[in-house]
């Protein structure tokens, strides 16, 4: 079964530290440059480029990722140059800013990737008829790239490939009607939520195979997003339960985004 991980106390604490240190990074500049309005403005522009570049670079692929990370480097150079220009304890100021930035980045990384070490809470189950639905177009073709169909069949899992014009929800219901006692989905977060909702309606365990672009749900579960083949082992293992949310009748297993980030993820992803 999918290992439905819980948010550990340490990861929640790390996320809180990341948010607070990020806010401190912005707030500390006025303390250093309170009487220099132009350098202060330039430094804030630099920080904006750093944040924007890292955010876009982390959610883009191909050449776009390089361009956005380059913007982050330009922003960093702008902040450093401004502080050097102002002078007066420049070394101390750079050390403080660098320290806060390291704390922010390190805490954020741990909060997002730290492994879950909670003890097993569910029964070990061996399914009689596990079925895996796969979207070959998701994630730039990860199903084919990682040979997920072959890997699943070798593990004794029946596979169903999503074809153009197919109704994914109907394929999931048909799989359950054929006797699927574990249902999996190899695709992105949207497909995961759709199939997981149908599995939940029928009280059938669900397995997440991270074959999408960003795989936020898999990240929350602690799965290896770089190699979706490892998640196939979830069809035989420990079953855990998680909460899900409903908004206007639509199921969400990960998050609901509004504002800037929602606009970013709606943009087409550059090819590899």
Image (spheres, grey):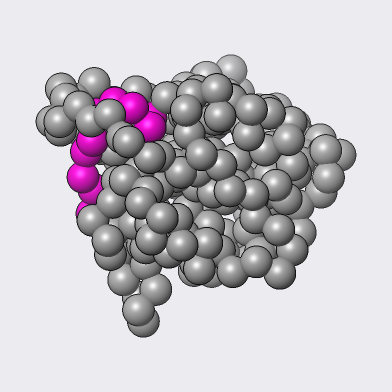
Picture coordinates of residue 32 (x, y %)?
Answer: 51, 38
Of the pair 143 and 129, the residue shown nearer to us:
129
What is the quadrant of residue 128 in the picture? top left
Whether residue 252 can be seen here: no
Inspect the magenta stretch and tell me whether residue 172 lies in it.
no
Q: Is residue 63 above or below residue 147?
A: below
Please provide the residue range marked out in magenta. 234-243
Q: Is residue 38 left or right of residue 272?
A: left
Q: Is residue 207 above or below residue 95?
A: below
Of the pair 166 and 226, the residue shown nearer to us:
166
What is the quadrant of residue 63 in the picture? top right
Q: Is residue 241 left or right of residue 136?
A: left
Determine the residue located farthest toward the front in the rendered image. Answer: 178
Name the residue at 27% across, 61% down.
202
Of the pair 182 and 62, the residue shown nearer to us:
182
Inspect the magenta stretch and tell me whether residue 235 lies in it.
yes
Picture coordinates of residue 230 (x, y %)?
Answer: 50, 23
Q: Is residue 69 left or right of residue 211?
A: right
Q: Is residue 185 above or below residue 261?
A: above
**Main SS category, magenta section:** loop
């Amino acid at each position: 079964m999918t290992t439905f991980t819980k948010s550990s106390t340490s990861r929640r604490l790390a996320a809180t530290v990341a948010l607070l240190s990020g806010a401190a990074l912005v707030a500390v500049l006025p303390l250093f440059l309170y009487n220099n309005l132009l350098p202060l403005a330039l430094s804030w522009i630099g920080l904006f480029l750093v944040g924007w570049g890292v955010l876009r670079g982390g959610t883009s692929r191909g050449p776009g990722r390089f361009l956005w990370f380059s913007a982050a480097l330009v922003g960093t150079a702008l902040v450093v140059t401004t502080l050097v220009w102002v002078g007066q304890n420049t070394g101390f100021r750079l050390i403080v800013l660098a320290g806060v930035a390291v704390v922010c980045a390190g805490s954020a990384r741990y909060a997002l990737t730290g492994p879950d070490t909670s003890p097993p809470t569910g029964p070990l189950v061996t399914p009689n008829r596990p079925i895996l639905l796969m979207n070959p177009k998701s994630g730039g073709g990860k199903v084919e790239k990682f040979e997920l169909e072959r890997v699943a069949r070798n593990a004794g899992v029946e596979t169903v490939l999503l074809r153009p014009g197919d109704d994914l929800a109907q394929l999931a219901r048909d799989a359950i009607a054929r006797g699927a006692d574990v249902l999996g989905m190899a695709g992105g977060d949207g497909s995961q939520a759709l199939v997981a909702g149908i599995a939940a309606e029928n009280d059938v365990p669900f397995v997440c195979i991270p074959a999408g672009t960003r795989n936020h749900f898999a990240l929350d579960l602690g799965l290896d997003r770089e190699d979706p083949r490892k998640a196939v082992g979830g069809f035989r293992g420990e079953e855990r339960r998680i909460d899900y949310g409903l908004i206007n009748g639509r199921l969400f297993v990960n998050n609901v985004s509004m504002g800037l980030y929602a606009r970013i993820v709606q943009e087409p992803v550059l090819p590899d």
